[in-house]
Image (spheres, grey):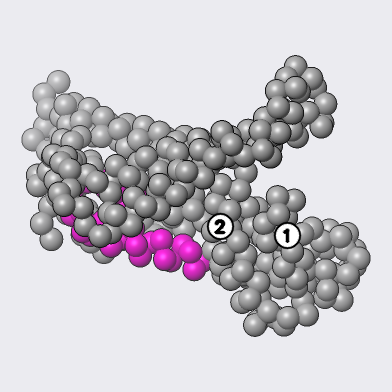
Amino acid sequence: MEQGQGDVSWSEIATKVKIIGTVVTLLIGAELFYRWITHPDDSFSVYQEIIAWIWFHLHTIIFGADTVTLTTSETGLRTVLDFNYHSNLVGSDIPLLGVTDECVGIHEIAFVSFMIWMTPGISRQLKLRGIAAMSLILSILNIARLLILYPLAVNGCSDSAGQYGCWSPMWNFHQFMQDSGFMLLILIGWTTWYLIVGGPAKTRDIRNISNLITLPKKFKQRQPLPQWSIVVLLAAAVIATSAVYTLGFDSEAEKERLEAEGCEGIVTAICAEEIREWDNISGKAWRTLLVSGVVSTIAITKVEWDSTSDEEE
């Protein structure tokens, strides 16, 4: 069968499929790495407390200071909000709402940032601007999502005050956002950014997989080190020292390690908790060392980017 003049050749189809497969593979790899790096509980403890603090204070401004309290979680973080003060909610056993590492929006920001960075044909500067804009938008939307939970719970209990589960609209909305809502926002946000920067025209004729990402051309040591590099190195050293102390010298951590080792092969709720606690402590420490090493490398290394993969604006 002869190929028509306007037909797409099999080689072109194979190239497009290869590009799509590469994108999907990289996204899956990035997702798996993110899951590993954030496996310990409360991986973003400081940021979680910041988000909880912002949520609490905005809530008190909008709905009143007598409608909520900010309390500590089981791990000692001040990340838990209690809504059991409105007349509709008293007696309904509405659960305490904690800001976990899955509720701060870091996963969504990381995912869309990786999508933007992998978009071919777009200049590095436009990608960085897109990442900054999407990070800000998703952070604001995440705070708005948290603020919406209270009126949803109150309105859900307006006709059945005090009944267990009357706050289910709040929970259903929370689950929807966690399961698919944020993904829809990411897709809409990325598509909007892609159209604004003229992505279709820039990526239509790309046939080289190497153009999928902005590739580094050369690495060299920064000489002399700029001030920001010195600040970053000092911060990384402090964080790494804390991790080393936890693994080698912290008496509480050592106690948790010994208790976890003593529970090996024993199937009880107490032992499961002890093992989980040590996994969290050691996991955070090792991941902190890894991040400190990566950040230090970035601080002392200057990257020259391949000009062929960074289209001029």
> Which residue lies at the image location 32% right of the left edge and 37% below the top edge?
23
Q: Which residue is mark 2?
A: 46
> Which residue lies at the image location 75% right of the left edge and 17% below the top edge?
265
The secondary structure making up most of the magenta span is: helix
Q: Which residue is mark 1?
A: 72
Q: CA distance from mark 1 to mark 2?
A: 13 Å
- Amino acid at pointer 1: Thr
Q: Residues within 10 Å of mark 2 (few under 14, many from 20)?
A: few
In the image, residue 93 above or below residue 9: below
Mark with earlier residue (1, 2):
2
* Residue 221 placement (x, y as % from top left): 17, 43
> Which residue lies at the image location 52% right of the left edge and 56% below the top edge?
105
- Examine the image and state in which quarter residue 80 appears: bottom right
256 to the left or right of 128: right
Pick the quarter of the image with the C terminus: bottom left
- Examine the image and state in which quarter residue 216 appears: top left
Q: For the residue labelled by badge 1, is the local secondary structure a helix, a strand or a loop? A: loop
* Residue 5 placement (x, y as % from top left): 8, 35
**Magenta-colored span:** 113-141
In the image, residue 62 above or below residue 298: below
- Amino acid at pointer 2: Val
* Residue 38 placement (x, y as % from top left): 53, 42
In the image, residue 48 above or below residue 88: above
- Visible in this render: residue 195? no
203 to the left or right of 106: left
